[in-house]
Image (tube, helix red, strand yellow):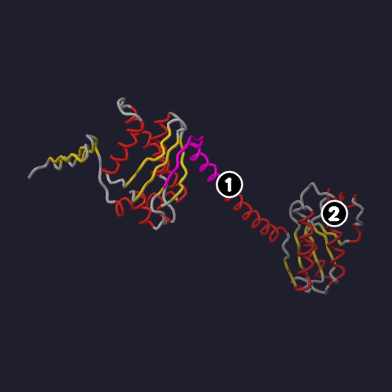
Amino acid sequence: MKNNHSINIDGLQFDWDVAKGEFLFEQEDAVLFWITSAMKEFFDTIEEISGEEASTLVFEAAGFRQGTVVGKYFEDLKHVNVEEAAELITTTYASAGWGYAHIENLDLESKTLKVRLKDSWEYKINKAQGKKRRGNFLPAHYAGIFSVFFGQNVWFKIKEDQIVGAETTVIEYFPSDITITQNIHALSRKKESQQILQLEAMVEDKTRDLKELIKQISSPIIPVLDGVVVVPLLGKYDQERAEELVYNTLSKLPSYQASYLVLDLTALDDNIDQLTTSLLEKISGAAGLIGTETVLVGLSAKLSITITESGINISDFHCFQTLQHGIYYALSQQGKQII
């Protein structure tokens, strides 16, 4: 069985060495893939891993960079000018199954041109994928080629798109400051911004949950015995925490049918301020309106001085050093005792 095969089509050489598993196109290693099955699966996999937006940029960047390789190859052929190279490229690509391509309105002075594509391999893949618009590999590929030919960065704009019903895809090329590097950086910044926004939203959610948790645990109402509830004051109070404490306490006192409210000040912040001392007066005053008497326990010497200096008459409260004493007092006033 013959393992070596060669064929020349329109001046382009194709060679196979089946024993070695080699396919040469113009004396260069090449490879063949089925477009709408194997290559489609390849494109689908990249999009699945990278996401559609990132994968579009991947194909665009790869197309442009491959185009510069092709451009440099033809640029090194000193006997071939730009117009001839453009014709050779489209012929070469057609023989390799890239579809129909035609270079139009090539203007070396303004460094502009138009490329018309029909039934390209990229179009076939995009159609098999069910895309609503074509990809940017081939448009960027020609941008890379002519950026080399013109010695200036060239970019593109798709004017007609076969994937949406046009007979051909028409792409205009022109000098531009747009580069694949800029596009990559722009996408990176966009992704970073999206991640920052997601993190900020997550932090806001967690902060909101944490604040709600703090509200629930920072001033709990503990019914210890019939008619007696204890509210421990914890840490330092700002305006929001103070208002929450007052509201939470007074809204729940009736449900416990509490005759005595024992405020445990043991865990209050040492640096107690005017807001905290006025909070005691506000709670006791409001509790009194619904028939609940307030008892203060856990008063330190420093806290007693601060309360006195704030102008609150501490003699208006029944004060005890420990929580146990305060509860005993409340029970005795109801004619009860712990046995």
The answer to which of 252 and 17 lies nearer the viewer is 17
* Residue 126, x across and y down, in percent: 38, 53
Look at the image and say whether residue 185 sits in the magenta stretch: yes
Which label was assigned to residue 196? Answer: 1
Look at the image and say whether residue 330 sits in the magenta stretch: no
What span is colored magenta in the figure? Answer: 170-193
Amino acid marked by disc 2? Thr
Quick one: SS at disc 1?
Answer: helix
Q: Is residue 132 visible?
A: yes
Question: Mark 2 highlights which residue?
Answer: 277
Q: Residue furthest top?
A: 78
Amino acid marked by disc 1? Ile
* Residue 28, x across and y down, in percent: 24, 35
Q: Which residue is depicted at the point 31% across and 45% down? A: 98
Q: Does residue 226 appear left or right of residue 160 in this picture?
A: right
Q: Does residue 251 appear left or right of residue 154 in this picture?
A: right
Task: Classify 10 Å Cα crowding around label 1: few (below 14), some (14-19), many (20 and above).
Answer: few
* Residue 47, x across and y down, in percent: 41, 51
Q: Measure the C-alpha gap from mark 1 to mark 2.
A: 41 Å
Q: Quadrant of the C terminus?
A: bottom right
In the rendered view, tell whether residue 11 sits above or below residue 321: above
Between circles 1 and 2, the one closer to the viewer is: 1
The answer to which of 287 and 189 lies nearer the viewer is 189
